[in-house]
Image (tube, grey):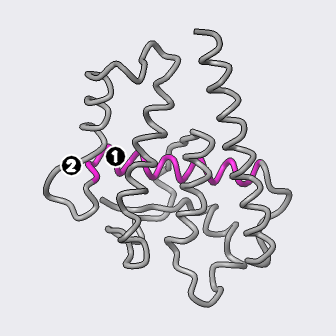
Amino acid sequence: MSFRLRTDAEKWFSEIADHPGMLKFDLYYFCLMAGFAGIRRSPLSGADKPAFVDEFPAPYKLQQNLLLAGLIDAELRSLLGRGVTAQDKPSVHRKVSELLAATGTSTHLSNAGSAKMNEYASGGFDVLVERLSDKPRRLETFLRAYAKVIADLEEEARKAEADFEAAE
């Protein structure tokens, strides 16, 4: 498992990246959560930076299972409306098995799961760029704007799910 952050994301976050106590994984996390909330993925390119860490950093280790659950949730939500329902146990089992590895990795992610997680972080960066008027210059200001973006994405998802359920 390797966590990768797009080169343009590193540049975009450059003014807050050196904030005391900030980890590179924090920047990845901001992007990942936006990708999960918006159910948005985009591929990384060969020009993007190589992996910056191979496992969840210590401050995130206790939340590792929540991050894995976020990946599973985003992937299952992306399947809804494409002929797959939450009650379709074989499809759900197949998707979870594709994303997770029972043994051999401290992150419990398969290679496919690792790639998907990086794609959600990449897609989340796209969401942040689209929804924020400018790159972050101060952490405090960014965090307020970021919280609003995530809340808006969650509200949009709730409305879409309600519309989907009403159409069934």
Query: Which quarter shows the C terminus?
Result: top right
Residue 66 is situated, as x and y percent measured from the top left of the image, at: 41, 56
Give the overall secondary structure of the magenta segment.
helix
Above or below, comparing residue 88 to residue 35 in the picture: above
The secondary structure type at the circle numbered 2 is: loop
Asked if the residues shown at circle 1 and circle 2 are in contact, with their CB atoms under 8 angstroms apart, the answer is yes
Q: Nearer the viewer, residue 49 or 69?
A: 69
Please give the name of the residue rendered at 44% of the width and 36% of the height, measured from the top-left corner.
75
Query: Which quarter shows the N terminus?
Result: bottom left
* Mark found first going from the N terminus, 1 or 2: 2
Q: Which of 51 and 154 is in front in this view?
A: 154
Q: Give the range drawn in magenta.
A: 109-130
Q: Which of 167 and 112 is in front in this view?
A: 167
The secondary structure type at the circle numbered 1 is: helix
Residue 88: image tag:
none
Q: Locate residue 41: give its quadrant.
A: top right
